[in-house]
Amino acid sequence: MPKCTINGQEVEVKDGSTIMEAFSKLNEGIAHYCYHPGLSVAGVCRLCIVDIEGNPRPQIACNTVVTEGMKITNKSEKIKEGVKWVLDFHLINHPLDCPICDQAGECGLQDQYMQFGKYSSEMAEPKVKKHKVVDLGPTVVLDSERCILCARCVRFTDEVSKTNELGLFNRGDRTEIGTFAGKPLDNNYSLNTVDICPVGALTSKDFRFRQRVWYLKDSETVCTGCSTGCNVKVYYNKEGAFRVKPIYNEKVNGYWMCDEGRFIYQWVNREFRLLKGRKKTQGQNGWQEDIEAGALAQDAHKAIKAAGDKLAVVLTGQYSTHEYQTLLKNLPTKKVYHWKNHPEKWEEFDGLLNRGDKNPNTKGLVKALSEASIKTDWNELASGIKSGAITTVIVAGPENMAVYGDLEEKIQMIGAAPQVIWATACKSNLFDKFSGNVWLLPMKSYLEKNGSFINHQGLEQNFKKATTIVSEALTLEEASYLLSGQSIPLPKVPSVDTFIETNRRPDQVTLEHRKKNEFVYKRGSL
Amino acid sequence: MSVVIKNPEKSKWYLSGVMGGLVITARHMVTNLFNRKKMMTLNYPEEKYEYSPRFKGNHVLTVKKDGSIRCTACMLCATNCPAECIKIVAAEHNDPTVEKYPISYEIDVLRCVFCGFCEEACPVDAIRMGPEWQTPGINGSQFIYDINHLAYRPQLKGGVVSVVDESERHKSGI
Ligand code: SF4
Ligand code: SF4
Ligand code: SF4
Ligand code: SF4
Ligand code: FES
């Protein structure tokens, strides 16, 4: 365990650690681009130079191993001057189109420049022009001019996703990132390259131009995409959620997350959500719309009371453990069934993060059921409905319906019961297939409540509420209180959209002006 | 607390004061009728006051030489606006040299405080504050100026051309 001194502070590091690791152990700031703790060391950006006592030339911190008694500093005048000039080299061909660059506001180049640079450029030569707006694949767009050639993305596809789509082509200042022979960057981890790109060279098609990053707030939570439970940060503002990025957790996901999980946020936005309660009464045509969620749940309570012991509950692994426990305590029935979507795929694993069980909390549900000593078989539900032993079914339906391929089939099966109380966060046309009495309760999504998920390894992870998107929605916990006839304070509903409705115009550019603006232009070869 | 002092003796003679006032009014009326140049007021709306061309009135979105919108939808103006009255929706452009452009640009001019910060923030001279100041409307939504009004309203006679011209930059490669 060698000891070294960094900027006057002594630190002991593991054998074979690099100076960079010693810096991050001390939380000392150091300029760097190409170093990423989750990737191999490339040492190409030369920005992490430090002074080592007794060494005549600066060394790079990311590729120099700490030896006993090393005295290291990055605060000396020589290093400050050096970093400034390395930065100047990085900016020689950089287009500096920050105003239209999606990375602006969270850009490594901007940050380092504010910290170490602040000089005027000494370059009079024209900048080398490279390809802009290159379509790398279904998820990522490349702007070669902004690329600083740190090769993080190349190393990622090489070492982590092991798909090897990206490479460096040409030499010198004409080097460009690209894909070989038109093979697109198309894997389930491709958007991680956008996260690790320190500049705005790689941007995500999904997020591109939708918001400036400084309009977004972030909050840490757990991904609900599968039973791995990656730790993520959700970026949102009052218009809804916009993107998801992974955060480091050694035990669960390391530095990465899959693309599938990144798109889960879309289901929580208003356009996909059930905003108000809906009810359908048998014999009547169409739905009664816009019923306040709390009132609807209290209404459904009457039906539950009348059903007595002909009540059954169906649970999916998409709610938090605490919600299951409260629900099982509140509802007086042992006929609780676990709805498993494609259980034959549950053991699948792609070798990195993504698992076949697309429910974040299957283990939590199993735990809550065994705590309440409930042991049931799914087939009993079908036969119970058929024989009339079950007349009323409460369903805690899936939040992310896209992974429930059996939704239609299950709606038909459960819809055979005369009364169904379906709790759901999202709307779906499939609900029109119900023939009996139906209560549709709007639920809160995972961003709008506190709770915990137990992932596939049995690790319990808490998450906290980030924001409110549908103010009237209930948590399963609140719904279970109301359904069992207890009264709780209901969420207050602010009247939204009080301002003049004519303010909303989607696309205002008239066709004539658009045509002028949208001639397709090809820039030709480099 | 106010005390009202009633002076019945004095208030009997109010008539002379009223008459005095009417005489002044009549004198001004007669001078204005026969000597209109000396008149202090304007006959608005037939006559209008001309402010200096540098007056910061209603916003104008400038255009490029080909008549398309200059704005790059960078949202720096919206970020800088203290009244938060600019709303922009950006989109991807088909032309790679343009990349980003606004499909919607709205200024809620009733909230605007005419500070000119938007103009100052813009890196490409895409928004300017023009000399117009008479902009009546009959309901709230008419004061939300959209992109077509800001850039192509008839008063602008086909649009104001921006001083920042990128086509030169593309040609020289800088
Ligand atoms: S990569 Fe960074 S420095 Fe370059 S244009 Fe984008 S925000 Fe600006
Ligand atoms: S695209 Fe981004 S991550 Fe890849 S080499 Fe360029 S700057 Fe680095
Ligand atoms: S003038 Fe000031 S208040 Fe008005 S839009 Fe511009 S920045 Fe906003
Ligand atoms: S008007 Fe100027 S500052 Fe505002 S979005 Fe357009 S380019 Fe940016
Ligand atoms: S971080 Fe060390 S050379 Fe790039």
Image (cartoon, coloured by chain):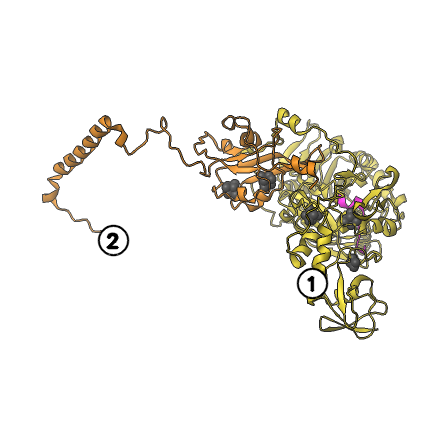
Chain colours: A yellow, B orange
Is A369 drawn above or below residue A181 in the view shown? below
Left or right relative to B42: residue A4:
right
Check disc 2 and give the amino acid type. Met
Mark 2, other Cα within 10 Å: few <14 / some 14–19 / many ≥20: few
Range of the magenta residues?
A: A253-264
The image quadrant of residue A241 is top right
**Circle 1 residue:** A80
The answer to whether any part of residue A67 appears in the image is: yes
Q: In which quarter of the image is the C terminus of chain A?
A: top right
Q: Nearer the viewer, mark 2 or mark 1?
A: 1
User: At 16% from the left edge and 49% from the top edge, which residue is drawn?
Assistant: B5
Chain of the residue under label 1: A
In space, the residues marked 2 and 1 are separated at their CA atoms by: 72 Å
Picture coordinates of residue A407 (x, y %)?
80, 37
Chain of the residue under label 2: B
Q: Residue A509 carries which label?
A: none
**Circle 2 residue:** B1
SS label for mark 2: loop
Picture coordinates of residue B132 (x, y %)?
45, 33
Mark 1, other Cα within 10 Å: few <14 / some 14–19 / many ≥20: some
Q: How many marks?
A: 2
Is B44 drawn above or below residue A364 in the view shown? above
Check disc 1 and give the amino acid type. Lys
The image quadrant of residue B98 is top right
